Image (cartoon, coloured by chain):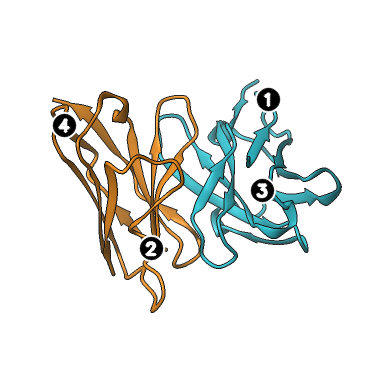
Amino acid sequence: QVQLQQSGTELVKPASSVKISCKASGYTFTSNYMHWIRQQPGNGLEWIGWIYPGNGNTKYNQKFDGKATLTADKSSSTAYMQLSSLTSEDSAVYFCARSSRIIRGSLDYWGQGVMVTVSS
Amino acid sequence: DIVLTQSPALAVSLGQRATISCRASQSVSTSSYNLMHWYQQKPGEQPKLLIYDASNLASGIPVRFSGSGSGTDFTLTINPVQADDIATYYCQQSRELPLTFGSGTKLEIK
């Protein structure tokens, strides 16, 4: 069965960076886009970007350009998102989610989310 | 960006029908697909896909959930509503990047 297992809660200081992971299993990692989504406390869902692990291509929401960097390791079927220059605004839960098909698919499987808290 | 508009909350009685709407600022349909999807999110959990391409039931989702619509107007229906359905429901479009989500409709019991 498809599973996306994300890394644990992060407490980080302002101006620092954090890298969170999303380990995929139960399907061919290189065949589906992996998306990242942010949910700030009490708020809705914002799309950050996607990575295609088959070739490493990425696409970002302009809002997160320069904030998020997406990578993938085919050998371990793991996707990563690094967030840089963190501020309190970046405190949120971050989800990875698999796209159901190559073209314009829904997000059919989600990781459990990683809570990132930015505080001094 | 395509803006998706949802009502903030809906109160229904158990066993009744709930109709949740989502309006897009421009068409999210192509000649092949209606690219609107619906998710359920309970507190402290990740979103779960309910309906994809406007009207297709995702795997393992009960048949009391259904979706309809095309172009700019879409509806998620839950009939009959059960206690376990208390959650926030989000629509999401994949017609254009950036992917966008509605602000969510919180389903409450009357």
Mark 2 crowd level (few <14, some 14–19, many ≥20, 10 Å Cα)? many
- Report x, y in % for residue A45: 45, 43
- The residue at the point 39 percent across, 75 percent down is B30
Viewer-side residue, A27 vs B30: A27
What residue did someone put label 2 on?
B2
Q: Chain of mark 2?
A: B
Indicate which label's residue lies in the foreground, 2 or 3.
Answer: 2
Residue B50 — which label? none
Report the residue that reaches farthest toward the bottom.
Answer: B31
State the CA–CA distance, disc 2 to disc 1: 33 Å
Q: Is residue B52 left or right of residue B26?
A: right
State the CA–CA distance, disc 3 to disc 1: 18 Å
Q: Chain of mark 3?
A: A
- The residue at the point 51 percent across, 51 percent down is A107
State the CA–CA distance, disc 2 to disc 3: 22 Å
Q: Secondary structure at mark 3?
A: strand
Label 3 or label 1, whichever comes before in sequence order: 1
Viewer-side residue, A11 vs A2: A2
Indicate which label's residue lies in the foreground, 3 or 1.
Answer: 1
Labels 4 & 2 near each other (Cβ < 8 A): no
Which tint is chain A?
cyan
What residue did someone put label 3 on?
A68
What residue did someone put label 1 on?
A8
- Report x, y in % for residue B27: 32, 70
Q: Secondary structure at mark 4?
A: strand
